Amino acid sequence: MHRSRTYRQAALSALLAAGCLAMSGTTFALEDQGSTRPVQLIYGGYHKMYFETVNRQHYGSEHPLTLFRWELQPTVSAYGVPLTMSLFYTTEDNDPGGNAGRFQFGLSLSSDQLEQTIRDRLQKEVHQSTQELMDLEPSLTTEADRAQITDRMDQLADLQHNLDVSSRRLDQLQNLGLLSSTERLAMRFPMLGIGAAYPQYSRFVMQGITVSGFHLEVLPGRAFLGTNIGSVRNPAGAPGFSRFGNFENDRKIYAGRVGYGRPFGRHMHLMGVFVDESRDDPLHDNMSGLERYPKMKNFITGLKFRMGAIRDRLDLQGELAASFLTRDADAPEIANEDLGRIPILSSLIDPNLSSSADVSGMVDAALRLPGPGTRLRVGMQYVGPGYINLATPALRNDMIEQTGGVEQSLMRRQMTISANFRTERNNIDNLKSFTRRSTRYDLQLALNFRDLPWIRLQYIPVIQTNRAHDMPTGTPGEYTYNTRVVNVICGYSVPVGTVMSTSTVNVSGQFVSTDLVNADATSFLIGLNQHLAFGNTTVHGGYQRFSFTRMQSTMVRNDITLGGSKRILGMWLHETGLRNSSGQNQARVTGLWYRTSIPVRYLGIFEIMIDQNRFSGSMFTDSTFNQMQFTASLTRSW
């Protein structure tokens, strides 16, 4: 016992010593097979503490009256390879099973930071080579010397625009002395970590969930291998405000993808995700049939690609996915034994009478024509009515969509014309009692002539048809909505002495006509904004008038804002402003806010904001009340 405690104390002492050395950037020696190599640990990171309190709950808000968040991301670089720890804590949603109230932890190799470090080195080398070329004496320089520097600059420029992890690129970086052997190995691991992560496989396979567990991505050559194994965090919200995607049972996930290329470049990946709730749970099993929730299984597989053609003028990307869902693992088995013996699926989801399957897919192509800036784009998306994916909870199913557009630049890109369309239809198999079809066009003109005001013109006609069956009588009804939106935005910046003046005007109108009685409506908005900047001081003001007309009744609302900012001693920022919003038979809101931020030595940037609002004559009550919000934060990077 005593010896074990001594060992633990020695290990903790060594860890603390290493941390102190890392924080001070101290160089020390490691012995490797009889040789001594200097190793420098560089310590950095980021942290933010945030506090918020309000005396009155916002209407419909999920936030508590008082909350606190803390983020900490310390980073240690050894041999140039950064390792980042991610810690996050918040007092929000501390209900049992809630996601946000938990302490989130992650430890990973920061490949993004390593790649940015290499890009910084490339930029530094470009500047250095440019300076060397400018410092050459014509009388003492040969063409070979000049060509050597020029070739190096060409290699650096090529690497800046095409930095990937192919063997040829990594060889170039090493030959130029910009990449160590350890960093080269780390570049092969875009993701290597444990704890909380947010895997983004694709739109239809896995996206928008938090996974706590083990995460790995490796690039052997041009191949790509990745896996994520762990538990899915439950996005439960506060009572009465349950968030989309909430679930009751413990949910495990096993995901992987393999293929060619990095996920955000040219690639082709085969993906598979298995979501499992069928683990033994004594608490769940002891519940009655009415209280317990069925245990589900979900297997999703997909193929995703992105490729270029016609000298990279054509960008083609797409995806095809299938989802196999068992809603209740304890449901009766399938009577037809052949249906229960589907290869692979039988071992993963064990299909029964509660099982279903469907597919989804998309394809998108963008073509850039040679010459005066012409771009074409077409696309299509399909999500089957039975496509349910537990790893993508926010995905909308039962819809088919087509998109397209063209963009043309003229007069040295001072004029741009674009036209886009999108059509969408739900109820693909006519299984529902309602069907919606919509077609949207978007026509835009942008003018950016030098020394003249810039202008944006936009016209958006939308046609939407809703067809529904009256369930008691079975009588169908079809209603059409025709909406036209017109937007005009104009702005101009001009110096007036030592003052820079920026003025903007925006006008927007929306006109809706329908087949329904008293459903036609018109809205109109006009806004004026003025911004003045001189030295360390800015002043701005704005006015907006919004009107809405329906059934011969018009609602008008006027909003006025005034504000300004001043920087004292070159670093202490003060900002303040006031707002007033009023209208007939509407709530009147008068507000005043103040914000200040200042760098504090050794601590970081300290910021305080106070927002005071007074509400009177609201649509819910004639009472008058005040609402004050106070926030404070402390942020530091090192």
Image: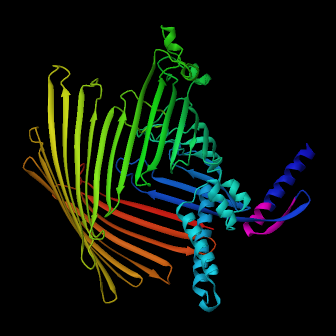
How many marks overall?
A: 0
Left/right of residue 457 with respect to residue 391 in the rendered view: left
Q: Is residue 582 above or below residue 304?
A: below
Q: Residue at x 52, y 38 (%)?
A: 234
Q: Quick one: which residue is furthest to the bottom in this view?
A: 139
Position of residue 367 measured from the top left corner of the image (x, y, whole percent) = 36, 52
Q: Residue at x 63, y 47 (%)?
A: 219
Task: Examine the image and state in which quarter residue 494 appears.
Answer: bottom left
* Magenta residue span: 18-31
**Residue 73 visible in the shown view:** no
**Residue 392 visible in the shown view:** yes
Position of residue 157 measured from the top left corner of the image (x, y, whole percent) = 55, 68
Given residues 467 and 620, the one toward you in this image is: 467
Position of residue 567 measured from the top left corner of the image (x, y, whole percent) = 45, 80
By what rule are the colours in the image chosen? rainbow
Left/right of residue 30 with respect to residue 169 in the rendered view: right
Q: Is residue 29 magenta?
A: yes
Q: Is residue 581 above or below residue 190?
A: below
Q: Is residue 522 magenta?
A: no
Left/right of residue 359 with respect to residue 210 in the rendered view: left
Given residues 77 and 561, the one toward you in this image is: 77
Given residues 583 and 539, the one toward you in this image is: 539
The C terminus appears in which quarter of the rendering?
bottom right
Q: Is residue 377 above or below residue 525?
A: above
Q: Quick one: which residue is furthest to the left in this view?
A: 552
Given residues 489 and 178, the one toward you in this image is: 178
The N terminus appears in which quarter of the rendering?
top right
Q: Quick one: which residue is furthest to the front in this view?
A: 143
Task: Examine the image and state in which quarter residue 46 appears.
Answer: bottom right
Q: Residue at x 10, y 38 (%)?
A: 515
Position of residue 313 measured from the top left corner of the image (x, y, whole percent) = 40, 55
